[in-house]
Image (spheres, rainbow, N blue to C red):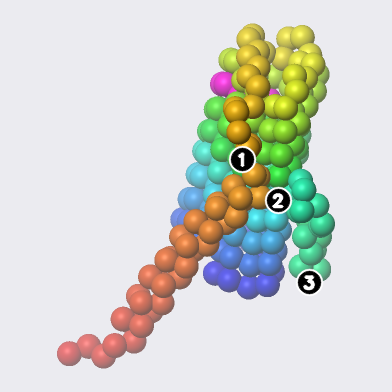
Amino acid sequence: MGASEIYIDGTIEGDLIAAGGYIEINGVVTGDAIVAGGGISLNGEVEDDVRAAGGGVDISGTIGDDFVAAAGGGSGFMMPVQSDTQTVEPGIHLADNAQVGGDALLAGGVGDLAGTINGELRAGMGQVSLAGQVGEDAHLSAGTVTVAETAQVGQTLFYNSEEQTTIPSGVAAKVEYSPPPQGTPADPASVLLGWLFRTLLILAGFALLGWLLFCSCLEPWF
């Protein structure tokens, strides 16, 4: 589906594929959610995977399995994302009540991660703040990494940043720091645009398939 603003307040049996200026999921999606838009807000539940690409991605609900997302923020992407009636701050934001049942793979300018990720976390961003829980390893690669005292990593915390940061005691059983690789670091904006491009291609493919199936249903039976 596609529209300037999309609101899911009920239950969708199966997968949700949507593109719009603003997408808000307050209900339940029993399959995957593949969404691309200026602003994306998940307050309800997606029982399987979520793949999201947008200027701002806010998660305060539940994701049953893996979470793959790209969003803005950082240099050149700090302006709030506005639709007809909604405003979303740029970046990826996991509220403290957000739940991710599997792994999280995140890219973009800004990451504010205060929720729970039961699997592994991999984040490549301009700046990332970890204040939530990660069940397995956490891999943070950013220009600036901040780890709060409330953060908990079940296994090893790996981080790569321009400068070493203070990691509070007890956050992880083991902490490993590595400096940025030699050469020009990856531009978060380029990572973001790559994710957006690939996701929009997926959405366009599904839209084309749906159109072809619809047209075939209109053909007369012989």
**Nearer mark to the viewer, of 3 and 2:** 2
The amino acid on which the numbered mark 1 sits, given as a three-letter code, is: Ala
Tell me if mark 2 has few (under 14), some (14-19) or many (20+) residues whose alpha carbon lies within 10 angstroms of its own: many
Q: Earlier in the sequence, mark 2 or mark 1?
A: 2
Tell me if mark 3 has few (under 14), some (14-19) or many (20+) residues whose alpha carbon lies within 10 angstroms of its own: few
Q: Nearer the viewer, residue 154 or 181?
A: 181
Q: Considering only vertical position in the picture, is 148 above or below 203?
A: above
* Residue that sits furthest to the left in the current view: 222
Q: Nearer the viewer, residue 191 or 22?
A: 191
The amino acid on which the numbered mark 3 sits, given as a three-letter code, is: Asp
Q: Nearer the viewer, residue 110 or 209?
A: 110
**Nearer mark to the viewer, of 3 and 1:** 1
Q: CA distance from mark 2 to mark 1?
A: 15 Å
Q: CA distance from mark 3 to mark 1?
A: 33 Å
Q: Residue 114: horizontal and vertical position, in percent?
A: 74, 32
Residue name at image x 64 percent, y 9 percent: 173
Residue name at image x 47 percent, y 62 percent: 201
Q: Earlier in the sequence, mark 3 or mark 2?
A: 2
Q: Secondary structure at mark 1?
A: loop
Q: Residue 93: horizontal and vertical position, in percent?
A: 73, 42
Q: Secondary structure at mark 3?
A: loop
The amino acid on which the numbered mark 2 sits, given as a three-letter code, is: Gly
Q: What residue is pinned by disc 3?
A: 84
Q: What residue is pinned by disc 2?
A: 72
In the shown orientation, is residue 199 left or right of residue 109?
left
**Nearer mark to the viewer, of 2 and 1:** 1
Q: Residues at badges 3 and 2 in contact (C-beta under 8 Å)?
A: no
Q: Considering only vertical position in the picture, is 142 above or below 27?
A: above
Q: Earlier in the sequence, mark 3 or mark 1?
A: 3
Residue name at image x 55 percent, y 43 percent: 68
| Residues drawn in magenta | 133-138
Q: Secondary structure at mark 2?
A: loop
